[in-house]
Image (tube, rainbow, N blue to C red):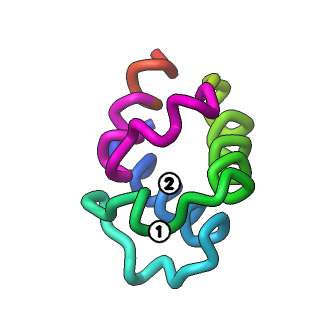
Amino acid sequence: MSREELIKNLIQYAALAFKVDASTLTEDTNLNELGTSSVQRVAMSAAIENEYDVMIPVARFGNFETISKLADFVMDEAE
């Protein structure tokens, strides 16, 4: 998996979970500005965990400020 592919997928997951247009999101998008609903965060985390076979602790999800930082975590965990 390339980082670019991962970023594209994370943008799609964020768009679905936070109900925003994916074209408005970039790797620098601040996840905390999209929403802080735990349901939205769990939905996004679950999609990522299922797709990439990684575990993202719900309490830790809020520590990923941007899609880019979340991608770094997924890349590290998926190795």
The residue that label 2 is drawn on is 10
Give, as a single range, the part of the protein colored magenta.
56-73
Q: Please, what is the three-letter code of the amino acid marked with disc 1?
A: Leu
Q: Please tell me which residue is depicted at 45% across the width and 36% down the height of the picture.
A: 1
Q: Residues within 10 Å of mark 2 (few under 14, many from 20)?
A: many
Mark 1 vs mark 2: in front: 1
Q: Where does residue 7 sit, x and y in percent of width and height? A: 40, 53
Q: Residue at x 46, y 15 (%)?
A: 79
Q: Disc 1 designates what residue?
A: 34
4 in the magenta segment: no
Query: Dot 2 lies on which element?
Result: helix
SS of the residue at dot 1? helix
Residue 46: give x, y in percent of width and height: 72, 42
- 17 or 38, nearer to the observer: 38
Q: Is residue 69 left or right of residue 58?
A: left
Separation of marks 1 and 2 at Cα, in angstroms? 13 Å
Q: What is the magenta segment's predominant secondary structure?
A: helix
Tag on residue 60? none
49 lies left or right of 8 = right
Counting residues from the N terminus, which is met first, the one under dot 1 or under dot 2? Answer: 2
Q: Residues within 10 Å of mark 1 (few under 14, many from 20)?
A: some
Which residue is painted at 64% across and 59% down in the image? 37
